[in-house]
Amino acid sequence: MSINIKAVLKKYFMVLVLIVVLLAFHAATGGKMLLAQNINNLISQNAYVFVLAAGMLLCILTGGNIDLACGSVVCFIGGIGAVMMDHDLPAFLAVIVMLAGGLLVGAWQGFWIAYVKVPPFIATLAGMYAFRGLSNVVLQGYAVGIRNEGFLNVFGGGADCYVPDLFGSGSLNLTCVLAGVVLVAVYVVMVIKSRVNARSKGYEVEPFYSALVKLVLISAAVIWFFYKLAQYKGIPSSLIWIGIVLLSYSYITSNTTMGRYLYAVGGNEKATNLSGIDSRKVYFFAYTNMGLMAGLGGILTIARATQAQPTFGQGYEMDAIAACFIGGASAYGGEGNIFGIVIGALLMGVINMGMSIMGTDANYQKVIKGLVVLGAIIFDVLSNKKKN
Amino acid sequence: MGKVILQMKNITKTFPGVKALDNVNLEVEEGEIHALVGENGAGKSTLMNVLSGIYPYGTYEGDIIYNGEVCKFQKIKDSESRGIVIIHQELALVPQMSIGENMFLGNERGKKNAINWNETYGEADKYLKMVGLSESSRVLIKDIGTGKQQLVEIAKALAKKAKLLILDEPTSSLNETDSRALLDLMLEFKKQGMTMIIISHKLNEVVYVADKITVIRDGSTVETMDCHSMKIDEDRIIRGMVGREITNRFPKRENVEIGDINMEVKGWTVHHPVYTERKVVDNVSLNVRAGEVVGIYGLMGAGRTELAMSIFGRSYGSGIAGSLKIHGREVDLKTPREAIEAGLAYVTEDRKGNGLVLSNPIRVNTSLANMKSVSERGVIDVDKEYAVAVEYKDKLKTKTPTVEQNVGNLSGGNQQKVLLAKWMFTDPDILILDEPTRGIDVGAKYEIYCIINDLVREGKSVVMISSELPEVIGMSDRIYIMNEGRFVGEISSAEATQESIMANIIQSGRDK
């Protein structure tokens, strides 16, 4: 049993760290940390991290490969969209062009990486410079504002971009609470269903109590989270996009053949090739997809800021990479999952926000962030070393 | 009689699941050339790794007594500081660096933070002369040939003030002239008082240089022959190497009908992927029928794996020429995927490097080469995948608590079964098994043999590559003998004896 506890501790170590850090800031800021508004901001401020990290995870899975260009791509794509809407082109067209543009940029980088074998670090470093330059060209060096109301509302910009409350106006947003309850209900039904299914076919199932504890804890966390949001203004529209991205990629990584190939290439590329899987296609997919996510990241970024500036997206790639590694993705590839990057992104977000509330000097904030990344990797390396 | 400089007493070394060395004893006298011979996997290299501290003191049992002292080496530097230097089969040189830099790598001349380049190159030139190289030590390693690189390795060992030099297959990558020059150099060193241990498969070379020959078989020392007190020839050594009795180590194969030719290869030639002018496989032809086990025997480096991988969707080599027919139809398999679809499976010798994703569970590894069968429109049916993994686990008697176990946590024998399961799940007609029993214990070997028999009973063809003679003879219907990239013989297993196969290889080496 003691071994079991150790394994659980290792698996959920970062979750524990997140809770401890959250509570520590809660105490240090005199309760400000867990105010409804701050919980809300934690999501909407970090929307880009979740989205980019989902793309980044797929690249990292293939063997610890990263994309340094995605911050510049966010700015470039955002710039294109802003200029289009500035010329009074319809928002839906701008969105399509931005997503397609992201996909193209990703395919461009993916081609060099997968088929010409340019090391990803170099290929994307080149992209980082080139797309930063192109952003400036597109925006001609200026900030371009966005007035398209529809676009801003859908993608979470401006002041009041929340899912409207269908049940009138109280101090509590009932739609939001209801959404939380429905989510938990769906989750519980799915867990029970898969358990019954596994039982009936004689597969191994998780011990009852550990499954129950997990179910209760996750449900409680979700309810608490939505209750907090309901106390503020409800569901921020960026949360919808984050939710769609995270659920899709969770499905892609765990249930599709392409997801499987990502892990296989990162785990042992030679064996994967000899199993009749073309690893080049896998690399190409990972980087093309990263471009798509950068496109979506661009949309969310300009929507939130209600404008595009040539300096947007700087350092975004690093935030995404950090979220992946803090969330347990292996720097050698083949290991990592979406749940992990959510925790990683949240931990970074909580630390940022906590220190901002406390008024920590911005320079020291960076030092702390750096140390957190280092600490997470040290933990990963040491715990794997013991295993071997 | 010289004084005994090295004594290895009752050395036992166990790897998880395998006893690599079992009570090995070795005695080397000062100023002699002592040869270690034995089949692949007999334990020669393991023994030398124990001696040089690659396996540190405490990970093996027994004593190493060198110059009258018990040695407790923790790392290679410890043994090197006592003058024991090992030169590995694989050259350990950095191609982009100069000869001189390589020679003193990790042992730089001059002060700690200021390398003395004059001393480096001056000293290096001195040692190069001792091994008969006229090159300047400023030449880059990649600009000299393999033969000269081997000499640089020796010069490097001399620079470490070697008193006991261990050469592991020093001539395996050299041509005839370079080999002879190297052996003569060894004899020259002997005159100067150097003690040497040589590991070699090339028995003519062993006879040429050795004063004493120790035979290792299955991790134990069998005998030590003194070449001066009696006349030792190659046949005598072979008898020592293979002289084990075969007792029912191979399950009988009954009621298997041999059918039509499933696969036929003609005039197959493969060049090295980097050194494209070098032929690795030279004009090889073979065929295998339904229900037949065909063995390919050859020593390491004979080109067996290269042959198999080049057939399997050109996974190895460049400039591949020759014809390949499957079920009588000429095919051109350009990728592993095409090979799998044509009904071919290649079960690699290197299960950790080329076969399995160690960080993934058995379930994932089992389905990896045939995802189509467990998925629909790109979405995996995990239930089905699980069922497949369990089915093969039961069928092959893989020992594991569940199929969710990571493959990296399994023993070698069970890993091999997972690898076999993966390829059996692709439902191939022709399986190429490359060293299917390497590094696994006797019990698991027997089970693998049973699986092979089941496969051919179903009408499949098996090509079994092996460097274990008893295994090849015990399991095959027919045996091809391969040496230096060519097939040098074909015999039915009824006529084959270990001596005849070995003699065949040695004969072909001489002809060349």
Image (spheres, coloured by chain):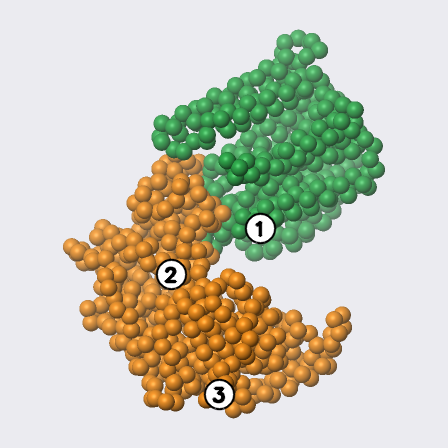
Chain colours: A green, B orange
Q: Could one spot residue A51 in this view of the protein?
A: no
Determine whether, in the image, residue A201 is placed left or right of residue A3: left
Question: Alpha-carbon neighbours of circle 1 within 10 Å: few (<14), some, or many (≥20)?
Answer: few
Q: Are marks 2 and 1 in contact (CB under 8 Å)?
A: no
Q: Amino acid at mark 2?
A: Arg
Residue B371 sits in quarter = top left
CA gap between label 2 and label 3 equals 39 Å
Q: Residue at x 55, y 71 (%)?
A: B71
- Say whether mark 1 and mark 3 are on the same chain: no
Q: Which residue is mark 3?
A: B2
Q: Amino acid at mark 3?
A: Gly
Determine whether, in the image, residue A90 is placed left or right of residue B38: right
Q: Which residue is mark 1?
A: A385
Query: Mark 2 or mark 1: which is in front?
Result: 1
Q: Chain of mark 1?
A: A
Looking at the picture, tell me which residue is in the foreground, B246 or A218. Answer: B246
- Secondary structure beneath dot 2 equals loop
Question: Alpha-carbon neighbours of circle 3 within 10 Å: few (<14), some, or many (≥20)?
Answer: few
Looking at the picture, tell me which residue is in the foreground, B82 or B44. Answer: B82
Q: Chain of mark 3?
A: B
**Residue B438: mark:** 2
- Secondary structure beneath dot 3 equals loop
- Image vertical order of residue A355 relative to residue B25, above or below: above
x, y percentage for residue B105? 64, 72
Q: Are marks 2 and 3 in contact (CB under 8 Å)?
A: no
- Say whether mark 1 and mark 2 are on the same chain: no
x, y percentage for residue B169? 46, 75
Q: Residue at x 65, y 75 (%)?
A: B104
Query: Mark 3 or mark 1: which is in front?
Result: 3
